Image (cartoon, rainbow, N blue to C red):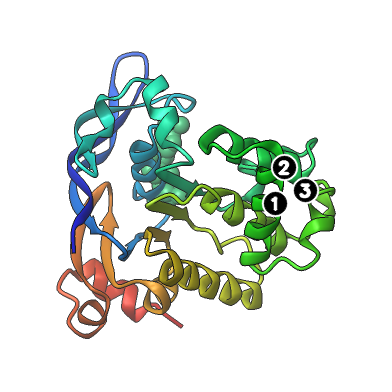
Amino acid sequence: MAKLLEVNNLQTGFKNSNDTLKVVRGIDFHLEEGEILGIVGESGSGKSVTALSIMRLLHDTPGEILSGEVNYKGTDLTKLTEKQMRKYRGKEVSMIFQEPMTTLNPVLKIGRQMKEVILLHTELNRKQAHQHAVETLESVGIPRAKDIMNEYPHQLSGGMRQRVVIAMQISCNPSLLIADEPTTALDVTIQKQILKLLKDIQKKTGMGIIFITHDLGVVSKICDRVNVMYAGEIVESAETRDLFNHPKHPYTKGLIESIP
Ligand code: ADP
Ligand code: MG
């Protein structure tokens, strides 16, 4: 398998008046094409900041990549200008957040939002984009996809909203999808459905997925390999089965013991 993503010595921090708080402290990891890699760790361990660093979405926070490389198919994303990066976001690398409304615009119809993304990144015309949007919504298990195109996000349940976000983020066939706690805000039954959906999407499209969660139980269901993150560092990295059978780091052992 070829390497899709290689993160080398990534350090990210937040500047305040006289200091920089380093929250990602020199991490290294890689993702093969078509692999589902978990990043697991307790709240505040730096998982989301890692994801936002890869996506170059730190400017609003305002955090800053202090050092390191994020090589995506051989291009170091940390070196790109914002304008160049916009060509990657949504088309090459996409991200799903815990809360669907982080992505969706509450005052625009689903169809319009889907079409905007598709028109931005493909050569399709408006009619084709409409059709592609409907088909993508259907592909993620949304019933009445044609009707839903005319609805606003608030008219859907939380689980359906997350499906819409997944549809939006895979609509332009990215090679890498980062899912940051995509099921944490959902009911348990819906969680299972969304996990299965992501796994099915991976199988069908061959895309690589980074699956971020604080829940090691979820990792065991979906990930091929896992990075365990603690206080801004990756303290252990292993194939999922090996991690559960032979955890090495005391923190990992504690995580496994705490699974109900
Ligand atoms: P996780 O996703 O693992 O729960 P985060 O990556 O969100 O953790 O956060 C890692 C650390 O970075 C935390 O200690 C958090 O307080 C800090 N942090 C995150 N966002 C900001 C911000 N906008 N300003 C300052 N510190 C932040
Ligand atoms: Mg987080």
180 is higher (above) or lower (below) than 120: below
Pick the front one: 126 or 134: 126
Q: Earlier in the sequence, mark 3 or mark 1?
A: 1
> In this figure, which residue is indicated by the disc labeled 2?
127
Residue at image point 38% right, 41% down: 49
- Across and down, in percent, residue 68 comes to 17, 34
Callout 1 amino acid: Gln
Q: Secondary structure at mark 3?
A: helix
Q: From mark 2 to mark 3, how far is it between C-alphas?
A: 22 Å
Residue at image point 33% right, 40% down: 54
- Across and down, in percent, residue 247 comes to 19, 77
> In this figure, which residue is indicated by the disc labeled 3?
153
Are there few (<14), some (14-19), or many (20+) residues within 10 Å of tag 1?
Answer: some
Q: From mark 2 to mark 1, how far is it between C-alphas?
A: 6 Å
The label shown at residue 46 is none
Tag 2–tag 3 contact (CB < 8 Å): no
Pick the front one: 196 or 122: 122
Q: Earlier in the sequence, mark 2 or mark 3?
A: 2
Callout 2 amino acid: Lys
- Across and down, in percent, residue 185 comes to 62, 60
